Amino acid sequence: MACRRTLLPSFLCCLIFAAGWALPVRAQAPRPVSFLAQHYDVSASLDGISQLLTATAKIEFRALEVSSTLRVELHPNLEVKEVKNEAGKSLTFERDNANPLYVYVTLPGSIPRESKFSLTFTYAGLLANAENSPVPGIRVAVIDHDAAYLLLPARWFPLTNYPSNRYTATFRLNVPDTWAVAGTGKAPAPQPMAATGAAAGGRLLYTFECKTAAPNGSFVAGNLQLNPKQAEGVNVAVYAPREQSGNAQDFANSVARSMTIFSDMFGGLTDSDMQVIQMPDGTLRDFNGPGVIFLSQRAWNPKAGDKTIAKNVAAQWWGNAVMPASPNDVWISDGLAQYSEALYAEQNAGKEAGLRTIDEFAVGALMYEDAAPIAQAARLAPYSGDYRSVVMNKGAMIFHMVRAQMGDVPFRNLLHDFYEKYNGKTARIEDFETMAAAHVQRSAKGGETPAQLRGFFVQWLNSTGVPEFTLEYVVYRTPKGFRVAGKIKQPLDTFRMPVDLRIDTEGNPEIKTIDVTGTESTFTVETFGRPKPGGIKIDPGNLILKGSSTLRSRAAIARGEELAEQGRYYDAVTQYQKALSIQPNRPLANFRMGEAFFAQKNYQASANSFREALQTVPDPGEKWTEVWSHIYLGKIFDLLGQRERAVNEYSKARQTNDDTASAQQVAEGFLKKPYAEGAITAAAPATGTAPQATPGSDIPAPASGKPTLKRPNNLLDDSNKVVQQNNLVEEDGGGMR
């Protein structure tokens, strides 16, 4: 084996360690690649007992520039045993000390530009947990005793320029004969293989052919049953355990509905056949690849997950057909696929449904908005919390703002033309900007000044920070009615955007667009009717991503939910406390804190939090916290042996008549039989007001990357802070009295 390891001087190691301690974890922005993989032939054996992956990958490369050093990305837990060239000669290789995701191979000599060559990598390693995962804290490749999943972000085979490369491939997966395998590509019936040991049991070899160049290479293995379905002319293969396959047709209907809507919006796909595959819990809630959607068991519900399915169907356009040219360009793939979820909701269920989805994006965007500018997305680990907040949620909000600047028809024409031009190709953020500017110019009517998108894109894609508006104004009486004069303030010095101002009066509302520039902008609006007290709203249509106490409180709760889902309950409680410091007595924050304490078996603190949640009347969208607070209190008293008090709480839960997540059924069950520690209680999937169900918990964890914290229709209602509102001043012919 020709392996070379570089040892750093001890003082330099100390400096690196100190820097790593002081700074938050970020993916390092990689240097441009010199070689791209074009075809893979991967043979991998998965051992469920030892949790070991053993693999050989023969890879055909193309040189983008003259170089003698090849860089690939491979899971840090997978140790490269050997790298050979086409002549069978072993080559020198090493892991990057600064970023162990990278493996560098020294080639025999400089490879001319556009030349092609092949290398064979032999490697193996344990895939048992989230240790060294390329997505921090999240298992994206695991081999367990009864199931396995290998998702592309894990880099379980050597990749180049992830997530911006497309390639053809053949994958040969050798698995226990009790497993079925599903994933990207087409596979015939598996071939029986000889057992590797006396106690190993039988084996099966699955061969997947991926003949279309795409980001192929994501698979799930385990107890899966194929359920071929068809809906609206779309073939959908649904893979799930037999006991969870009863809703296979509902999944097919959901996929077909999204496929039809997006085909009308963007243009048709070359291949519309789809697979929906259930994967075990403990990883991403959802993921996608070419022609395939992966949903975790906790998200396995076609009704509650309809929008999630839509997002992953949209990724067939934005991420598979049109790919980002570099890791810094993923806004045009993951951001646009995310925004397509709102387009789907609006088309399928009406404008209000679309706005509620936009509201969720705003919450997700504020979770980690300052982690990096969108145009520097390569600094973020794909699918990490930072990445989902910045690229997906903030990215979706920026597409929403572009739509508001352009208008609905030009924006949809832009998406259609962008897909038509870049289908099967890669695109840069600059390509979208250029096409958007051209569409704005073409759609401008005679005498109308077109929207200036260049400055908008620089402001929102290259910088961090969001505005938080405050308002000062005075109302004057005039001979013809009333005049409102005031200032709009926000903290970003470089900010400039047209912002709508709505003044509700005793007659018809007045709407005026104000060009807000810098930290303070003045305005004057004439109205016929008397302005109502507190009736002046900034950005009433919620067309701009902005901060507010309500949104920042919700973002803190969302961060806590994400941490709780990872089992980091202490850190989750810190976020819930932060939410309460922003918005005191918010029932949802107290409820989630109660859940975290309950998971830690701190039952007194848990009971205190649930009692606090019951002290304040919640918003209609969070009313379900009442019934579930009573249920949790009942469970606490059952665990403490206080059955009479437990029955009292279950009875109060029944009296609410709130059946969110089958709360009534759960309460009735505990009235009949006391709750016992470790019991798994039946819980129906989300009903649109609470998160989706998870096995073993009554209220399931939040949706992927953006917890669904529903609110009433007056979205973002505290983003218009009135700092000063003077009494009415009468004006007579220009003089005040």
Image: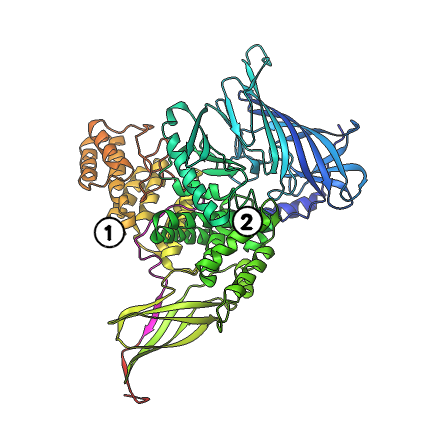
| Residue 617 circle label | 1
Is residue 83 toward the left or the right of residue 517 in the image? right
For disc 2, the marked residue is 24
Q: Position of residue 508 (x, y in %)?
A: 27, 70
**Element assignment for label 1:** loop
Q: Position of residue 453 (x, y in %)?
A: 53, 64
Label 2 neighbourhood size at 10 Å, few (<14), some (14-19), many (20+)?
A: few
Q: Is residue 309 magenta?
A: no
**Element assignment for label 2:** loop
* Up/down of 253 relative to 436, above or below: above
Quadrant location of the N terminus?
A: top right
Q: Position of residue 374 (x, y in %)?
A: 54, 54
**Which amino acid does the dot numbered 2 rest on?**
Pro
Quadrant location of the C terminus?
A: bottom left
**Which amino acid does the dot numbered 1 rest on?**
Val
Is residue 577 toward the left or the right of residue 28 in the image? left
Tell me the residue at 31%/33% (across/down): 683
Does label 1 or label 2 sit earlier along the sequence? 2
* Camera-nearest label, 1 or 2: 1
Q: Which residues make up the magenta segment?
A: 705-725
